[in-house]
Structure formats: C-alpha cells, structure tokens
Image (tube, rainbow, N blue to C red):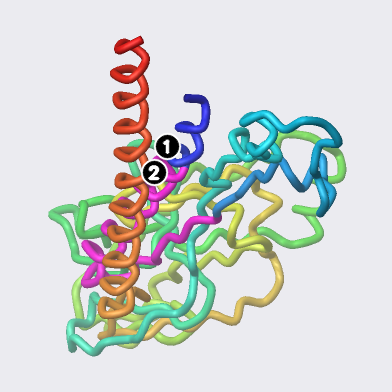
Amino acid sequence: MKDLWVPISGAIAQQKNVETIANNVANANTPGFKKDQLAFKEHLQVLEKGYNDIDLPNKEWAPADFYRSYGAENAQVKVDGSYTNHQQGSLQPTNNPLDLGIHGKGFFEVLTPNGVRYTRKGTFSINSKNQLVTSDGFPVLSKLDIPESALNRELASNKEIKLPQPEERIVNLGKGNISINLEGEIYQSGNRTGKLSIVEFEDIHAIKKEGNSFYINKDLRNIKNSELKSAVHQGFVEGSNVNAVSEMSNLIKAHRHFESIQKVIKAYDEVTGRGVNEIAKF
C-alpha cells in the first residue's frame, strides 16, 4: 500500500492551498494586505530512471509482468514554498488626514513590542501622548537620516552599526492641522515638524510576514539607501490586492481537487479491504 502515499501527498499539499486562498479571501477588505501564493513541486520517479517504450519480457508471462509502475509509487507532490504578491493595491479616499496610502514599493516603519516592523496599513491615529500610532497602538517612526557614505563604511568594516534607538524616532505631533506631502514630510500650522520613515527594500521578497499586516526584515543591507520612488497620499488608504471573485474561483477549484484526491484515497481503501476479505476466503 505504499502507492497510497502518492494521493496522500497531494491531499496535504492541496489542503495547504485551500488554507492559503481562504486566508486571502478573509483579508480581501484589510487595508494594505498582500495576498500569498504557493509553489508546488512534483517528484516523478520515471524522470530520474527513465524507461523504454517497449518493455515486454522475453519469457512466459506472469501476472506481475503486466504491472509496470516505473516508480510511480514513489512519486509525490508537495508545497515547495510560499511567496507574497506585492502588487500595488488601489488607493481609496477616506478624507481622514491620518489615513495614509503608499503608492510604490515602500513601507511605513513602526515600533512594536517585538522590535521594528514594516507595514503598508496606513490607518493611523493619535494616542494620549500625541504620538502617531497604528490601529494596534504601535508608534510610527520618523525618518532615520544617515549619510550613505557613513553607512557603507560601517558595512565594509563588518562592525556593528550603531544607530539611534527606535524610541528616539517616534513621531510626536503638536497642535494644529496636519498636512503630509508626497515625500512623507509632516507640517503643522505651516511648520515642518518631522518626516515619516518610508522604507524600500533591495529584495522585497526577503521580508517575511509576521501577522497583523506587519513584516520583518532581518538584514539591514536589504534596506535601500538610494532615492525612494514611493509617494505618500494623505487621506487615502491602500486596499488589499486580493481580487475576491478570482480568489473565490480558485478556492472552489482547490476544494474540488481536494475532494477528487479524497476519492482516490477511498478507492485505495476499498481495494485493500476487498483484498483482505478475498485472501481470508482461501
């Protein structure tokens, strides 16, 4: 019954696919959400060993001679990995001056209990300390200005890079109307009071999701130091890049594939039970 592991591997992979698509659908209305997709890997034993088109034994045939699996019982399929689709979501107007949407590849830098994280969810507010915070109450950070020459010098020396503590970069707001331009500069009553930290990455797929619309970047070398191309739009939020209709269609397909594999497993089970019963008769 080692053949049974072939459909079981497919069922496990398809179940993971169903869970991933269902999570995308559940977050279709989450601001700044980026959908996840899976990559599958199929292992075919026949591609490793090969076989001849004509494979007939030159002898008196036995029933076993008609069974040529070519290693199919060792085939399998599995999830080779998952990746996040960072395609731009549509910017939706809210007329709330504390709602900010990013057009481009940038992320807001915020301070969480687990350290500095990055997010595209720009539904901000002001807490009792006059700090700009996320919908979870985590402080938003201001721009860290380090000369590129100094940063490259520190990286080349392989020394630990000494940077200002994140707590020193929390965006504090005063009184007055808030205006934020496309570069993320904050103005109140006509005076510039700070600049939001908008971060872009050399390899956007190197950052990992951590839940609640937050991402983690484990390598400072992945942060771009060149001129950024992202623009901040005040009074807008970025919608998710999930197409609900398309994802629901994919979810139905994944469910049907899973059900088909279940039928195969059930057929194997019936064959086994029938074989045991027939053998018992002898």
Percent of width and height locating residue 157: 86, 39
Residue 8: which disc?
1
Percent of width and height locating residue 269: 32, 31
> Which residue is disc 2 drawn over?
11
Position of residue 148 in the picture relative to residue 132 (left or right) = right
Q: SS class of the residue under badge 1?
A: helix
Going 28% across and 50% down the picture, which residue do you hit? 138
Frontmost residue, 133 versus 240: 240
Going 38% across and 47% down the picture, which residue do you hit? 16
Position of residue 118 in the picture relative to residue 32 (left or right) = right
Q: Is residue 211 magenta?
A: no
The image quarter containing residue 278 is top left
Relative to 7, is 3 above or below? above
Position of residue 205 in the picture relative to residue 173 (left or right) = right
Relative to 196, is 23 above or below? above
Q: CA distance from mark 1 to mark 2?
A: 5 Å
- Amino acid at dot 1: Ile
Question: In this picture, which residue range is highlighted in magenta?
Answer: 10-39
- Amino acid at dot 2: Ala
Percent of width and height locating residue 118: 44, 56
At label 2, counting other C-alpha atoms closer than 10 Å, the crowd grade (few under 14, some 14-19, many 20 or more) is: many
